[in-house]
Structure formats: C-alpha cells, structure tokens
Image (cartoon, helix red, strand yellow):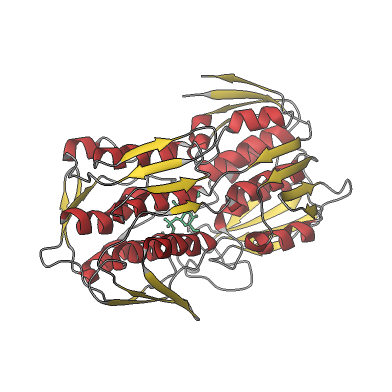
Amino acid sequence: MSQITINGGKPLTGRVDLKGSKNLVTKAMVAALLGDTPSTLFDVPFISDVEVVSRLLNLHGVTINHDERTGDMILDPSRVEQARMTDIDAYAGSSRIPILFCGPLLHRLGEAFIPGLGGCEIGSRPVDFHFDVLRSFGAVIEKHPGGTRLSAPEGLKGTKIELPYPSVGATEQVLLTATIAEGKTELTGAAIEPEIIDLISILQKMGAIISVDTDRVIRIEGVKSLKGFTHRAIFDRNEAASWAAAALATGGDIYVGGAKQVEMMTFLNVYRKVGGQLEIGDDGIRFYHPGSELQPVVIETDVHPGFMTDWQQPLVVALTQAQGLSIVHETVYEQRFGFTDALKQMGANIQIYRECLGGHPCRFGQRNFNHSAVISGPTKLIGADIRVPDLRGGFSHVVAALAAEGESNVSNVQLISRGYERFLQKLEDLGADFTFEA
Ligand code: EPU
C-alpha cells in the first residue's frame, strides 16, 4: 500500500511524454502469440498491466525482452507451451487481458486456461460477449473453481457474429480468434476505436486479411499462419486527456508530447467548449488554462467516435471549477461515478442521478443505475484523506488533491501505475508538491 501527501493549490506546468496506449500494447502482446516468428513492439510503457501480461506470456513459453527506457519490446513465441493451472491462477484478479489469450492459445495449443479476471471495479464487467464469441467459433468452455478451461475439439472455424453492444474487448476477441480460424468471419456491431484499428494494422502486418466496412462491420478471411510483426504502438489517448484535464483543473499549462489531434478530436472540442486552450504541435499538444472562467458543458460518454468513458473522470474535476451546471451522462459503464464521493468530500457539489440526463436515453435508463452526474461550480476544493478506487478515478483524485487548498493524503496510489508510466516522476516534473511513502 503506498500513499502520497500532496500540498495542493499549485498549477501543474511543464512537459510530459506519452508512450504507447495501455489499451493497445497489452492486446498487441497477445497478438504476438499468433505469430510463427518473433515480434517487435515499440513504445511499450512500463506499467503494471504490461508486467502482468508479460508474466502470463512467460508462463506460456513466450520470451520477452522489454527495454524500460526506450519502450522497445521483443516477444519470441517460438516455444509456446501449456502453462500450469496453479501458476496461471496466481494472476486471478490482476487484469482483464487474460480473456484475450483464449483464441490464440486455442490455435496454438488446442486448449486454454484463464484465471478469474481483474481490472477496475467500474460496473459488473461481464464477459458473456467473449464467451458467446468463442463458442460461435467452436470453443467448448468449462468453468473450474480456479478459472475457466477452454478447448476446441474440432478446431476454430470462421463464423457470423453480431455483438449486442460495440464492446472493445469482444471485438478484439473476434479479431484475435478469426485471423487463423478456418474460413471467413463477419462481425457486425464491432467497436472501431483507434486502438482496435491499430490492432488490425498489426494483424495485417502479420499476414491477416481484415477489412473494416461501413456501419461497424469487420470481415476477416482466415489464413493458415501468421508471422511476427514490427510496430510502433498508437499513443495513449487516455493519458493525454488525463494530463489535459489536470492542466485545466489546476490552472496549469502542460505540453503532452506524443498526443495527436485526429484520435482526440472529440475530446479537443469539449476541451475548447469548457474554455481550455490548446496548441496543436508536430510532436504533441499544449493544453492550458485560459486564465479566465471555465464554462459548463453537457457530455455523454460513448463508444468511438464519441466522448470516451475514460476521459470523463479527470474532466469532472475540472468541471468543479466551471461557472454553472455541467452534466455528464455515462453510457458505457453503469457504475462509473463512485470516484465522485471523494470529490464531494473535498467540497465539490456533485449530484448523481439514475435518469439519463444527457438528452439521449441509454441502455442504463430505467434500471436503477446511478449513471448521470450534475456538477455545479465553481467550488473551492479542500484537501482530504482519500483512497484511490480505480485507475481513472484514482488519477482524478490526485488531480483534485493537486487543485485543492491544503494537504491531502492519497492512499492506494500504486493502482495508478497500472496505466500511467512513471506517474510520480511526471508529477514531480510538472512541479507538484508532494511526498511519497511506499
Ligand atoms: N460488456 C458486456 N459483456 C461483455 C463485454 C462487455 O456486457 O462480455 C459491456 C461492459 O460491461 C461495458 C461495455 O460492454 O458496459 C463496454 O465494455 P468493453 O468490452 O468495450 O470494455 P473493455 O474491453 O472491458 C476497454 C478498456 C477500458 C475502456 C473500454 C471502453 C482495456 C483493457 N480496457 O475495456 O479501459 O473503458 O474498453 O472504451 O482495453 C481503462 O483504461 O481505465 C479502462 C477501463
């Protein structure tokens, strides 16, 4: 358990540099399992989600060389082997990525065992779409006390799948399973996030045949084998948005090296509506506070090209400083406002509602989920003792503590290193005043 004590009220200023997206690199590492030859991935951040996936790949015979400084990673899958169930089970609860090992392991070994899944507690986070997808390819799934065992007695065969919701993970499950399944696969209702398109690029480099058609349809023609890839991971849009919001909330000025405009257009529009200033450069984006009042906004989170669910938490902190009423309607996860309790404790005026307040009814309406927030500002934030609940919520707590007057003790901060590389070092580089206790 680690804790930081923050002396807030100082603007964050300076430069941070991004590496590859957590939500791409972990999947790209799994894709390497499909190759007959080694793969090289550049810009891999040194974060604990990458560490967990590395260890699980190691257990399956993949050797990995990760240069922490440059982010270069070489993965050699030439000796893929079945891992021991007890060794895999040791990773129960530590990540959600193991569910994506299923297809590649079924192809390589004919069976797969995956531990109980982890990840942030931001809703029930079921895996029904994943299992339905795998069954549709021909997998047989058995639940065991220590996890789930999958086999494919008749091999994996191309299929037609329609997702009930454009789930990122389930789309990746289809991609990672279909590329070397026998025959063609057609996926409708697919997620088309930039990280998914980057994963498709990787698979194409490996020899896969995948087309992304209009209306969320992805078609995959199975091939016999794939080779390794060499690829530079797409930048981390979530981390970029987090620092942008931190600049706004603390009255600061942050240059986010590696941030790119095209993949963040929806965020940049909202940032401007709030009053945030930005300068788009060749190698990054400068985000800064206007020096005048911030404006309230109405946002609905959504799948791409909508406003990402992972962008809302740090932005909510900035909205506590806007003049008037802002509304955030969360339509991706049913329970992603737990983090606002700590903000309220610090003096923010936030009400959470079960109704769909953004203007469009979503699938969580009339189902008693607290999924809309009304933020009334500006309110002075005062330091408090808070505990990091999950990755994005935790980042927003730290930002609130940095914006607040006085001292805050933020515990459980190690959770933030699941998705933010060198987090404390970056805070220090931006001039944050804090002390760390391991
Ligand atoms: N869903 C189901 N059944 C399933 C799968 C998903 O009902 O089998 C539901 C989920 O409960 C959720 C919605 O579908 O309500 C969307 O979930 P999705 O599958 O798209 O999310 P994910 O793949 O589990 C990834 C990211 C999340 C990000 C979401 C949405 C990774 C490792 N995680 O999760 O990132 O919020 O897509 O963009 O890629 C984060 O980085 O902090 C994070 C939570």
Residue located at (30% from left, 56% from top): 34
Q: Position of residue 411 (x, y in %)?
A: 54, 27
Q: Toward the viewer: 127 or 71?
A: 71
State whether residue 385 appears in this view. Answer: no
Could you tell me how many numbered marks the image carries?
Answer: 0
Q: Quadrant of residue 36?
A: bottom left
Does 373 sit left or right of 14 as displayed?
A: left
Q: Toward the viewer: 124 or 53?
A: 53
| Residue lying furthest left | 153
Residue located at (79% from left, 35% from top): 11
Q: Position of residue 187 (x, y in %)?
A: 37, 75
Q: Position of residue 145 (x, y in %)?
A: 16, 44
Q: Quadrant of residue 163?
A: bottom left
Q: Toward the viewer: 153 or 132?
A: 153
Q: Quadrant of ligand 1?
A: bottom left
Residue located at (72% from left, 24% from top): 433
| Residue lying furthest right | 292
Q: Position of residue 115 (x, y in %)?
A: 25, 44
Does 79 sit left or right of 331 as displayed?
A: left
State whether residue 197 appears in this view. Answer: yes
Q: Quadrant of residue 146?
A: top left
Q: Toward the viewer: 338 or 86?
A: 86
Residue located at (66% from left, 51% from top): 259
